[in-house]
Amino acid sequence: MNKRMKKLVAATALLSMLVASPIASAAQTYTVKSGDNLWKISTQYGTTIAELKALNGLTSDMLYIGQTLKLPTPAEYDVATVQAGDTMWKIAVRYSVPLNKLIAANPQITNPNNIWTGLSIHIPKKPNAYLNGRHPLAAGTYTPYVSTYSDGRSWNPDGTAARAHEGVDIFAKEGTPVYASVGGTVVKAGWNEYGGWRLTIRVDDNTEFYYAHMSGYASGMKVGAQVAAGGLIGYVGSTGYGPEGTSGKFLPHLHFGIYKRTPAYASIDPYLYMKWWELG
């Protein structure tokens, strides 16, 4: 084989490698587009402005179009590397996650049938219960959100002390339908100074799901009502932070919380459950 032919073969092989095997780290970066800002990017990818700035060595909030940002791995995912001979189905079996959830966790892979050795992919973390639950808001009806569990909150009836946020907030338009994530029995309904029009649904002997700040209830929602998983229970609003009827002190959103009744009544972080349900 002459030198010219060798160069042609080598160039063809290199081009083939570049087309068939995109850089694995591409799934962990973002290219800034017109209209982007750090807040928009951070909410879209489940992180914070501070984390984005620290990861990318940014000293200001200024961005430029075409800038490449490193993205942290969201808290609801682990990262795995594709091995020789892998398919998405094999990876799903290896990590004991449903194939549809694995694919949904990796929207950066445009063709799930075309993955390559060395590619980094997200493996959704499974919550320890309620794997068959559903997200309380339908896909496409709410904005991207991050965990707000344990964040500081200053409002309380007498205004004397700060408190920790006991759920996750999901922002959506006023009147957006709210659905029961898991079936159960309504044990609390009506007004709450913190949560406005809220429902508490007992889903098992030791667990209650809490839906707050609603603008109203679906028909039949009262203490003692039996609610099916996925059943309509109410509508997003901005009620609460005051006496009955108070609304508009914050943007409309659903506050979703999970509480354990024993050994002491206390909240647990609902974020991992919500992100698992979000994958469908």
Image: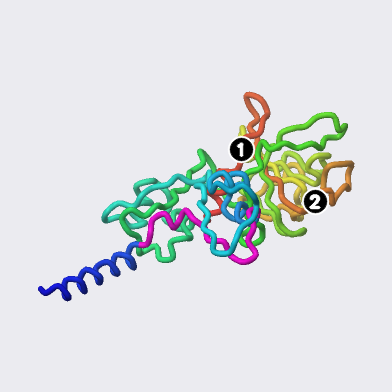
First in sequence: mark 2 or mark 1? 2
> Measuring 80% from the left and 53% from the top, which residue is drawn there?
215
Instruction: Indicate whether 45 appears above or below 167.
Output: below
Q: Are marks 2 and 1 in contact (CB under 8 Å)?
A: no
Instruction: Indicate whether 47 appears above or below 13.
Output: above
> Measuring 38% from the left and 58% from the top, which residue is drawn there?
23
Please state if 156 lies on the left or on the right of 113 as rendered.
right
Which residue does the numbered mark 2 point to in the structure image?
238
In this picture the colour scheme is rainbow
Instruction: Indicate whether 36 appears above or below 135.
Output: below
Which residue does the numbered mark 1 point to in the structure image?
269
Where in the figure is residue 57, as x and y percent of width and height? 55, 46
Q: What stretch is highlighted in magenta?
A: 22-39
How far, Cα to Cα, is label 2 from label 1? 22 Å
Secondary structure of the residue carrying tag 2 is: loop
Q: Residues within 10 Å of mark 2 (few under 14, many from 20)?
A: many
Q: Which amino acid does label 1 sit on?
A: Asp
> Measuring 69% from the left and 55% from the top, which residue is drawn there?
232
Outermost residue toward the front? 3
**Residue 45 shown in magenta:** no
Seen from the viewer's position, the closer of residues 218 and 20 is 20
Which quarter shows the N terminus? bottom left
Where in the figure is residue 262, as x and y percent of width and height? 63, 26
Q: Which amino acid does label 2 sit on?
A: Ser
Seen from the viewer's position, the closer of residues 62 and 270 is 62
